[in-house]
Image (spheres, rainbow, N blue to C red):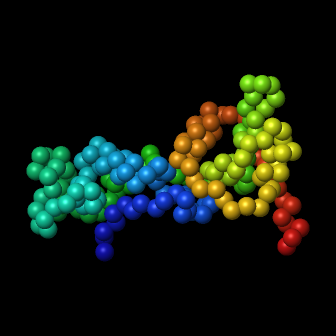
Amino acid sequence: PGDRRPGFVPAADLAPGEEAGCHGPFGSRAAARAALSGAATAAGLCLAVLGLERRRPGEACFRRQLGRCAGACTGALPASAHAEALQAALDAWRIPSWPFTGPIAIVEAAPEGGAHWHVFEHWRHLGTASEEAAARAIAAEPRRAPPLEPEGYRLLRARLAADSAIITLDTYEHCAQL
């Protein structure tokens, strides 16, 4: 009880909607570990308590000996305070819930003229079309959700923050099947 070490879950294993509240996404276990280590270092958290450093039971971690750990490994910092500090340190990587009721398209001008309609749902890129009707067809197409791609997620978050041209593509055609 009380051992709340962060774990690694491959983004491909998350169904749409399950990513909300997770942290990342990261391209690899090593990238996730590096981000966790960096956040822990900046916040003075214990790498041993987080499972990132080995130590003998009852001994202070290496960073505590250097004065860079707040002391969760020795009990100087209560486990609850360490857990709160960890959550605060990881907040920058928290994946929010999908903020739309369904799929969206981000429309951008194509270099050759016309437009590119990039279709997304639950932070996943579903496809690209050259016109609205084709984008709506992509959004309505039943399919297995593509994996959550770290780079695509970061690009989408940046575009949403920049107030890009966003078109909601909610389709209610599925209601007729009920």
Q: Position of residue 88 (x, y in %)?
A: 38, 50
The one of 137 and 57 positioned closer to us in this rendering: 137
Q: Quadrant of residue 151?
A: top right
Residue 33 can be seen in this image: yes
Residue 90 visible to an observer of this rendering = no
Hey, which quadrant is residue 158 in on the image?
Answer: top right
In the rendered image, residue 65, in percent from the top left (x then y), is placed at 10, 50
Residue 31 against residue 12 in the figure, above or below: above
Seen at 77% across and 52% down, the residue is 139
- Which residue sits furthest right? 176
Q: Image point 87% across, 70% down: which residue? A: 177
Q: Is residue 87 above or below residue 157?
A: below
Residue at (62% x, 60% y) in the render = 16
Q: Position of residue 14 (x, y in %)?
A: 55, 62
Total marks shown come to: 0
Residue nearest the observer in this picture, 99 or 150: 150
Say left or right for 157 vs 177. left
44 vs 129, left or right, is left
| Residue 130, image quadrant | top right
Q: Residue furthest front?
A: 112
Q: Quadrant of the N terminus?
A: bottom left
**Which quadrant of the figure contains the C terminus?**
bottom right
The percent coordinates of residue 131 (x first, y second) are 84, 39
